[in-house]
Image (cartoon, rainbow, N blue to C red):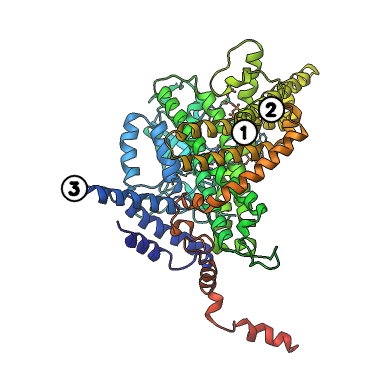
Amino acid sequence: MDEQKVLSIKGLLDDTPEEYLSHKEKYENSIRKSVLFYKTLHSTEDENMSVDEKTKLNFRNIVTSAIFKDNSPFMLHNSMFIPTIMGQGTDEQREYWMKRAKNMEIIGTYAQTELGHGTFIRGLETQATYDPDTEEFVLHSPVLSSYKWWPGGLAHTANYCIVMARLYIKGKSHGIHPFMVQIRDEETHMPLPGIKLGEIGAKLGFNTVNNGFLGFENHRISRDRMLMKNAQVLKDGTFVAGSNSKLTYGTMVYVRVLIVSNMANMLAKAVTIALRYSAIRRQSQPKPDEPEPQILDYVTQQHKLFIAIASSHAFYMNAMWLWEIYYSVSLQLASGKLDNLPELHALACCLKPLSTIDATAMIEKCRLACGGHGYMLSANLAQTYGLATAAYTYEGENTVLLLQAARSLVKAWVGHVKGRPLKGTMAYLAGDSTVKAWDGSIDGIIQSFKVVAIRKISSVVKILQDYEKSGLSPEDAWNKASVFLTAASEAHGRAVLLSVYKSEMDKRAAVLSPPLRKVLLQLVDLYVTYWALEKVGDMLLYASITDKDVDELQRRYIELLAAIRPNAVGLVDAFDFRDEILNSTLGAYDGRAYERLMEEAMKSPLNAEPVNQTFHKYLKPFMRGKL
Ligand SMILES: CCCCCCCCCCCCCCC/C=C/C(=O)SCCNC(=O)CCNC(=O)[C@H](O)C(C)(C)COP(=O)(O)OP(=O)(O)OC[C@H]1O[C@@H](n2cnc3c(N)ncnc32)[C@H](O)[C@@H]1OP(=O)(O)O
Ligand SMILES: Cc1cc2nc3c(=O)[nH]c(=O)nc-3n(C[C@H](O)[C@H](O)[C@H](O)COP(=O)(O)OP(=O)(O)OC[C@H]3O[C@@H](n4cnc5c(N)ncnc54)[C@H](O)[C@@H]3O)c2cc1C
């Protein structure tokens, strides 16, 4: 489809700025957009299309999916409902449900979190009680806290959902399992009997994702609605356990891996907006006889923004690397080989938190770098922040995931001390953790980050062991040490992020043109130097850095900012976001920020009339002392 058609779809869709719509209108507008985008997105290639037509079709698909994916009521359908069917369904269940889901004959979501429980999955209270007489499960929400709460699209959009419920057979609990549940009539869309549905209300962001609540009143579903790839319930009620109860948590690992790439994307959008605006905005007069400079020429502005470019690259490289690991572990799981699952879980529990923590902070920094205009909703920085910061919480709250990673690190370290070999991404923990002298090269700094991680892990293990020797239970010792357990996980995550970014760039460097290689490696250098300065305390404590070394690092950092400055706009243009996707008055490619700000301002309903009706109703009597 040519550019005009994409634009016209976009134009048709965005006749009213969302800021001025009601909560209900925003949702309705989002459904309209999602349906249109989905229609566009899924118009399939046909075999007699020319290569050029197929290329244009794929281009359009990327454009539309990138626009609609973030805030659509269909989001969970794509990101969790379909992956759960794929990962948790038997072959027959996949065969049946994937066809209906892919063709959008049904719209689904993933309902796990409850009003009373999000993190503690083993505490979920929704019941699925097997009735062998009718070969059905009875779904029930025994108390208010057991209502499903949060799932995207659940309120008014989805007519099916994956419900994560506690399985009971003959009064015995068999843990949490996934169930395919129809929640609305396919013709009338009315909630089915025994099912209560609604929307959870306005949120900081994601206000068109239609997050909802769901309560069951003894709602019956047939036995074949339990997704039975990893565990089964036979007709007579016999429970057949899976090889690993955590396999039912597979969708969460998948989405955590997706989130790392999504943070790369979000951060790239924000820094494109902020950097382009910084190139057109002129302010102040440091040199009396010269014109106001671009604010991009202030080194403090470069310090705020260039790390965001490098971080987006780092997250993208790590996401692609992690995705390869996820994919190979998934193949192993399919053949019953489980021993690499814990490492994948630990990696996802490090990289999802660190990418969301950094991206959230840096997107906010991009907004702050744009002064007052950054505060406008039409700049689309606040909304981008709202989307990114949600990922701090969803798919496993960051603190909890870092503690999960700490579990694996502590086990690996204790095993190492007892002589058990370390493997994969934790193998470096067996390395020499004494640093004789500071090595300021990129590889030297990355090695220092590994030393910091080793030292933090070993010292928190010592704290744990001392607490337990003093008589504390392992659980109490764990809780007491938990602040430094998360710090040890963060140190491990930093070491992974840095070393993977460097090694993945080294792999690609060989095929890059020399000028491009130079610029991209400058970003790697900037990223490593930035974090060495951010973590200078750890470097002083564990990596023998001296004040002279720090001085050198600071000077190198300043030189790197200057070196990157000439290519800064080119680097964000290379993210290649269309204006429709940036959807920002400040970030448009043509740089006409002031004209766009004024155009958007005039769309405010308040500007439809010169005098608002409240003047005559309230102000005038008030000012005349007559109110
Ligand atoms: C342009 C194109 C862009 C493309 C990108 C597209 C963008 C899309 C981005 C994504 C958008 C998605 C939107 C998502 C909306 C949000 C959805 C949700 O939030 S769904 C709900 C998510 N909820 C959670 O994640 C809950 C978090 N809690 C847990 O994971 C667990 O409860 C816990 C691990 C924190 C604790 O569980 P518990 O039972 O207490 O376990 P233990 O701590 O005792 O550990 C037991 C043991 O199990 C191992 N374990 C735990 N979890 C897993 C797992 N997931 N996989 C493998 N193994 C696991 C753990 O390591 C322990 O092992 P052990 O050997 O005993 O140490
Ligand atoms: C925008 C958005 C979309 C969402 N979409 C979905 C969805 O589609 N489907 C779905 O099922 N869920 C969804 N969720 C819910 C999300 O998965 C949960 O919010 C998340 O798992 C955290 O659980 P909680 O909110 O109950 O917080 P809690 O688990 O109650 O945590 C609250 C605080 O307590 C701390 N805490 C909890 N446990 C521990 C511990 N063991 N150690 C230390 N500290 C702890 C946490 O660190 C956190 O700071 C969504 C959430 C958001 C914000």
Q: Choose between 327 and 590: the one closer to the eye.
A: 590
Q: Which residue is mark 1?
A: 494
User: Please, is residue 224 above or below residue 474 in the view?
Assistant: below
Q: Are marks 1 and 2 in contact (CB under 8 Å)?
A: yes
SS under mark 3: loop
Q: Residue furthest left?
A: 48
Residue type at mark 2 is Val
Q: Which residue is mark 2?
A: 452
Q: Residue 627's x, y, as percent?
A: 73, 85
SS under mark 1: helix
Q: Earlier in the sequence, mark 2 or mark 3?
A: 3
User: Please, is residue 422 above or below residue 318 in the view?
Assistant: above
Cβ of mark 2 under 8 Å from ligand 2: the answer is no
Cβ of mark 1 under 8 Å from ligand 2: the answer is no
Q: Choose between 527 and 132: the one closer to the eye.
A: 527
User: Please, is residue 473 above or below residue 584 in the view?
Assistant: above
Q: Earlier in the sequence, mark 1 or mark 2?
A: 2
Q: Residue 562's x, y, as percent?
A: 61, 48
Tag on residue 48? Answer: 3
